[in-house]
Amino acid sequence: MDFSLSKKHLLMQELFRRFAEKEVKPLAAEVDEKEIFPYGTVDLLGKYGMLGIPWSADNLSYTLCVEEMSKHCATTGVIVSAHTSLCAAPISDWGTAEQKGKYLSKLASGEWLGAFGLTEAGAGTDAAGQQTKAVLDGDNYILNGTKIFITNADAAHVYIIIAMTDKSQGTRGLSAFIVEKDMPGFSIGKKEDKMGIRGSLTCELIMENCIIPKGNLLGKEGEGFKVAMKTLDGGRIGIAAQALGIAQGAIDTTVAYVRERKQFGKRISQFQNTQFELADMQTKVDAARLLTYRAANLKDAGKKYTSEAAMAKLFASEVASDVTRRCLQLHGGYGYIREYPIERMMRDAKITELYEGTSEVQKMVIAAGMKVN
Amino acid sequence: MKIIVCVKQVPDTNEVRLDPKTGTLIREGVPSIINPDDLCGIEAALRLKDEYGCHVTAVSMGPPQTDVALREALAMGCDEAYLVSDRAFGGADTWATSSTLAGAIKKLGYDLIITGRQAIDGDTAQVGPQIAEHLGIPQVTYAQDIEKTEGNALIVQRQYEDRYQKIKIKCPALVTALSSLNKPRYMSVAGVVSAYDTKEVKTLTFEDLKEFVKEENIGLKGSPTKVKKSFPKQVKAQGVKHEVDEDDAVEIIVKKLKEHFVI
């Protein structure tokens, strides 16, 4: 059993670290404050091959990438994660040769950004309650319905959309489709004003008699629920990595702060409370890291990882929320003002407990894996 | 065109701290990096490769752990990498280093050699020019721009403090790169994969270079430089910091210079 990264993965980590430090960190505060989607960064990510990492390298490298980006900017982390895990991955897993040929290389190069549409106003955790319908009409499917809370919406060109093709079949009546932004009847609705990851785009997708070619059915009719669930399994590794990055980034910036800040004639790093708090937090973050890397490793080995991905996401996201809150506390009043990145990190951390399955959903998945049902 | 880029692995001096008691460098735990000027040398070579399809080989002399610097060069896009490494090469000064590297480069073959101007650890700026001398080829140092032109020739801008020269040079030649030459690219994901999975760092030992470098010119024994004494530089006086706008700053500076009879 080897818990250390290989030389190749260490160099990969070094690449992501330098890129994040020089290209992502300087923009993070403004991206948050002005809700700027970092298009320039996305171009660079594509240029250096960071938008298709599982296919050019492996899932562990992809995990390292999301972690390093999220240390400085959780918005950038989720852009990579949603694009890779929720759009490129299902096309890679379920797509025909033709679909892969058409979409994968453009997604991997960053020419096209990707997104995923499952959630609806009445179908969140209860994903089976889908109202979006797809009806076959000659050589096309006609889609009608509205998706909400879609990460990367508007910036993305390619959307994986889950819709009902046969309501009588329940979840077995769901199907997955590849929809392009410029297909007739597809439009972007309201953009959400969020607490955190404010630079990332979160919008409604509106499909009004949206016409897509029959060949854009992903998998078979009726496999939509399976596509969605398997996609979310992979996505959870990405979100665990994002949470892990946020938490480690918070510790790193706090360590620097407590070494500088003086109170009662001492650096606050010299107080035992500071030391114990940070020691406790780093231990939790390392545990989250091991869970996350384990899930990525299992996926790379082609083994089952559903429960392990859910555990990684459950634990890492709760650690991220806990650690950012405690790190802010160590900053005292300065932690509450925007001059320091810690308040942003605390706001960003919360989303990791909510999207791609809330913490409660992760527990349902883990319990099911334990046959406790 | 075959380009050789010389790369040195150095301690990251941004991370080096001084032991407050002894005044010596704390080298423990300091990460190793590719010398910054050398990164610009790699970038210059890769730009020539992108434009003209040159073949780029990275060469470094050092202990086995230098491998990672060469993997980085491969991950940036170099085609091949050679590590010149042997116990016999240890303890080399700039003369022995340049003799050894010149031997390796001769063995590998070249049209153009690019080195960094100088390394951030030794700061000598000697190895590049010495390699050119050993090989008997022309050199342009302090390059801030390199352009390829007809007939296997280059036009190099050589930087001075207040001006630059445009020098046309015929290959084979050596150029030393300044950090202002370019902004080095990052490694790429596919590059890191190929650096470990499909490419290799080949090692050249003294045995491999015997025909190309004399034994009396390598390692500690081949190094004419003798270090008499090393000591940390003493800080003469604490500086004074003034937080003022430009106009007041000028006044303060002029006053100080007058006080010290500089003007």
Image (cartoon, grey):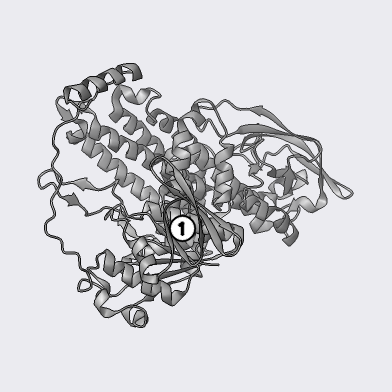
Q: Closest to the observer: B169 or A369?
A: B169
* Residue A99 appears in the picture as rendered: yes
Nearer to us in this view, A62 or A125? A62
| Quadrant holding the N terminus of chain A | bottom left
Q: Quadrant of residue A200?
A: top right
Residue at 52% across / 40% down in the picture? Answer: A76
Name the residue tied to disc 1.
B42
Give coordinates of residue B144: x percent, y percent: 46, 48
In the rendered view, would you say B105 is above or below A206? below
Q: Is residue A59 visible?
A: no
Q: Position of residue A110 (x, y in %)?
A: 62, 48
Which quadrant would residue B216 be assigned to in this image?
bottom left
The amino acid type, in three-letter code, at marker 1 is: Ile
Q: Residue at x 29, y 36 (%)?
A: A256
* Residue that sits furthest to the left in the current view: B21
How many numbered markers are drawn? 1
State which chain disc 1 sits on: B
* Nearer-the-camera pick, A121 or A51: A51
Q: Is residue A159 left or right of residue A266?
A: right
Pointer 1 local density, CA inside 10 Å: few below 14, some 14–19, many at least 20:
many
- Please determine whether, in this image, residue A363 is positioned above or below residue B223: above
- Answer with left or right where residue A267 lies relative to residue A293: left
Say which residue appears at 56% left-offset and 30% top-offset: A36
Give the SS element for disc 1: helix
Residue B153 percent location from the top left of the image: 55, 61
Q: Is residue B83 left or right of residue A275?
A: right
